[in-house]
Image: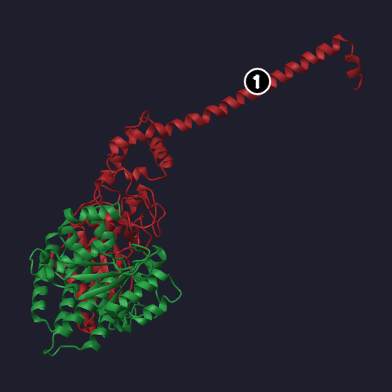
């Protein structure tokens, strides 16, 4: 990397990553950004679009889907698409959560999640992870969290938040933070997650985390959402846009609320409605905005 | 560090790399040494010790590490500069995880993890992986001895200085190339039946037939397990070399050699036997033909036709 000096001062530049290129050709490493490309130019997190754009997309599609989109339109009025690179769940969660904090300026929530994050760090350390291998990912998320709270020199607005979510460095580090948190939670509660995992793959809990949680670009499933929601104590609603229908004449959009373990046992908190809503289409998550 | 100031423009890769340098210095390993060049912390030099109880024992193998600008998202690349007979020099070595998802490098790994894995690879068969070599044990031992004499010459004077420094430090802690090894070879071959007089021949037979590398595999059980990360390192495997991990690691050299010997010697006997048989069959066939010809001639003579045949001449 002779020209490393110029290239490395620009964190977004990847063309100098000789190692990566080499592995691409030698080990058949798929370029993570090219995995399941939805659109070559789609940013990590897109602009807010009216729900009608979703209807337009399925104009000539399945009537069940069209009907479901119509039903979605009764509760939701906008969506934000994310890039289909296998990290879409985490990027959707990242933007949605930070945007929520930016809008509500909920200081109590930030204090609460910071305690949770500390616990996640401890979990990883207890599991034998070496601190320097994860601390950078944690500190970059905490930076973002503090930035969306107003009144500091480093505070940012909605536009800057979107820009940062689209910045490869910030975005990937935050995704990796969530991956570490998810992996730590799954391993900490291995007994709880084991039946889910053995249903999905033939691997042990640790193998699953190494192969399907920690590597960038690995898609997320129920297991990941449960773990992340529990670890950070953030409820998540997922609306399912698929072809399933209960009765021929009675179509409804299925949804599932992921209510964190700790919260659900507290009774009062159980009633709390998720403020993060994701739209799930098989293999992909986008952000939904309620009316 | 001057390099830090130069790069530290919010690039978290730099911070991470500096952390790794610090960690390496505070927890030095007797098995390897690695440090970045002063002018570019994405460029490292390292040296590893040949794993104990292998033909690499006592060897000091230098190499170069390149860290990508988006490290730790992308893996570091490794290249050996000292001939080892196991890895080609100045060619990138392909390290990856095997078992389930060969394409993934994990950000939770580090240069240390990769070096531990690299040492663990040395006694495993190359299996045709890119940049791997399958030299004979004797040649590898000779290279191990040679590796101590002088560090490789590579790169800029600054880099050379780092290489030389690493070499000196490694030399001070590396065990000598064991002289026992030749005797060991003899004890191994002595286990073979009928090897008392033809030690060398039997040994050659073992190595010759055993091209799949069982001879080097017999020492796999002694893979170094230098620290807690070795478990992670176990998951890292030279990518295209399939079956490496399946290779029996439980056999000790004493058990495996006699076990292999009969299967090696039998084919030789079996090949010779049919050859011998065929020759005899041919001779018998020829003899039968000759006798038949004689009998026919006699028969013709008796019937007075011999004159006709003889008259032809």
Quarter of the image where the N terminus of chain B is located: bottom left
* Left or right of A43, for residue A119: left
Above or below residue A33? Residue B138 is above
> Residue drawn 22% across and 55% down?
A205
| Residue B47 seen in render | no
Residues B145 and B60: in front is: B60
Crowd band around label 1 with a 10 angstrom C-alpha radius: few (<14), some (14–19), many (20+): few
> Residue drawn 18% across and 77% down?
A140
Instruction: Give residue A81's position: percent from left, percent from top.
Output: 33, 78
* Left or right of A242, for residue B57: left
Instruction: Give residue A181's position: percent from left, percent from top.
Output: 18, 67
Q: Which chain is red?
A: B
Q: Which chain is green?
A: A
Check disc 1 and report the residue beneath it.
Answer: B284
Query: Which residue sits furthest top?
Result: B302
The picture quadrant where one finds residue A161 is bottom left
Instruction: Give residue A206's position: percent from left, percent from top.
Output: 22, 56
């Amino acid at each position: 990397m002779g020209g490393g000096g110029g290239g490395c001062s620009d964190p977004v530049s990847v063309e100098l990553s000789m190692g990566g290129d080499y592995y691409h050709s030698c080990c058949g490493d798929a370029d993570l950004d090219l995995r399941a490309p939805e659109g070559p130019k789609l940013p990590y997190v897109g602009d807010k679009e009216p729900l009608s754009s979703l209807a337009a997309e399925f104009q000539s599609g399945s009537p069940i889907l069209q009907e479901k989109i119509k039903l979605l339109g009764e509760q939701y009025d906008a969506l934000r698409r994310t890039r289909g690179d296998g990290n879409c769940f985490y990027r959707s969660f990242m933007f949605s959560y930070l945007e929520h904090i930016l809008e509500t300026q909920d200081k109590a929530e930030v204090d609460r999640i910071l305690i949770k994050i500390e616990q996640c760090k401890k979990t990883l350390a207890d599991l034998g992870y070496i601190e320097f291998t994860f601390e950078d990912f944690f500190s970059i998320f905490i930076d973002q969290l503090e930035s969306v709270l107003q009144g500091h020199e480093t505070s940012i607005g909605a536009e800057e938040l979107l820009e940062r979510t689209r910045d490869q460095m910030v975005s990937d580090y935050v995704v990796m933070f969530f991956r570490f948190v998810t992996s730590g939670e799954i391993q900490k509660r291995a007994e709880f997650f084991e039946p889910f995992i053995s249903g999905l793959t033939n691997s042990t809990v640790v193998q699953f985390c190494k192969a399907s949680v920690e590597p960038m670009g690995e898609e997320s499933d129920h297991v990941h959402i449960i773990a992340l929601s529990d670890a950070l104590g953030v409820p998540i609603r997922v609306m399912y846009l698929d072809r399933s229908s209960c009765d021929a004449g009675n179509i409804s959009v299925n949804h599932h609320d992921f209510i964190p373990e700790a919260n659900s046992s507290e009774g009062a908190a159980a009633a709390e409605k998720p403020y993060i809503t994701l739209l799930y289409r098989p293999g992909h998550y986008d952000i939904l905005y309620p009316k | 560090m001057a390099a830090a100031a130069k790069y530290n423009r919010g690039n978290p890769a730099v911070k991470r790399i500096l952390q790794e340098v610090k960690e390496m210095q505070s927890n030095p390993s007797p098995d390897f040494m690695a440090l970045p060049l002063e002018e570019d912390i994405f460029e490292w030099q390292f040296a590893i010790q040949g794993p104990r109880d292998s033909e690499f024992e006592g060897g000091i193998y230098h190499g170069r590490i390149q860290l990508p600008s988006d490290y730790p998202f992308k893996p570091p690349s490794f290249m050996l500069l000292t001939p080892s007979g196991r890895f080609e020099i100045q060619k990138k070595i392909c390290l990856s995880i095997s078992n389930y998802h060969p394409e993934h490098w994990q950000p939770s790994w580090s240069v240390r993890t990769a070096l531990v894995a690299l040492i663990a690879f040395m006694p495993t068969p190359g299996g045709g992986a890119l940049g791997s070599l399958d030299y004979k044990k004797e040649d590898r031992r000779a290279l191990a001895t040679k590796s101590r004499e002088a560090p490789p010459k590579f790169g800029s004077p600054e880099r050379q200085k780092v290489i030389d420094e690493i070499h000196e430090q490694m030399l001070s802690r590396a065990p000598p190339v064991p002289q026992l090894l030749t005797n060991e070879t003899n004890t191994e071959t002595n286990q073979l039946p009928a090897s008392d007089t033809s030690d060398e021949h039997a040994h050659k037979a073992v190595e010759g037939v055993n091209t799949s590398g069982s001879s080097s595999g017999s020492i796999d059980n002694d893979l170094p397990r230098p620290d807690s990360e070795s478990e992670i390192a176990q998951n890292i495997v030279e990518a295209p070399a399939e079956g490496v991990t399946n290779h029996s690691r439980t056999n000790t050299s004493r058990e495996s050699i006699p076990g292999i010997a009969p299967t090696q010697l039998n084919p030789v006997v079996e090949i010779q036997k049919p050859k011998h048989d065929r020759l005899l069959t041919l001779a018998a066939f020829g003899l039968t033909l000759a006798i038949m010809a004689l009998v026919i001639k006699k028969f013709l003579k008796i019937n007075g036709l011999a004159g006709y045949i003889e008259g032809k001449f």
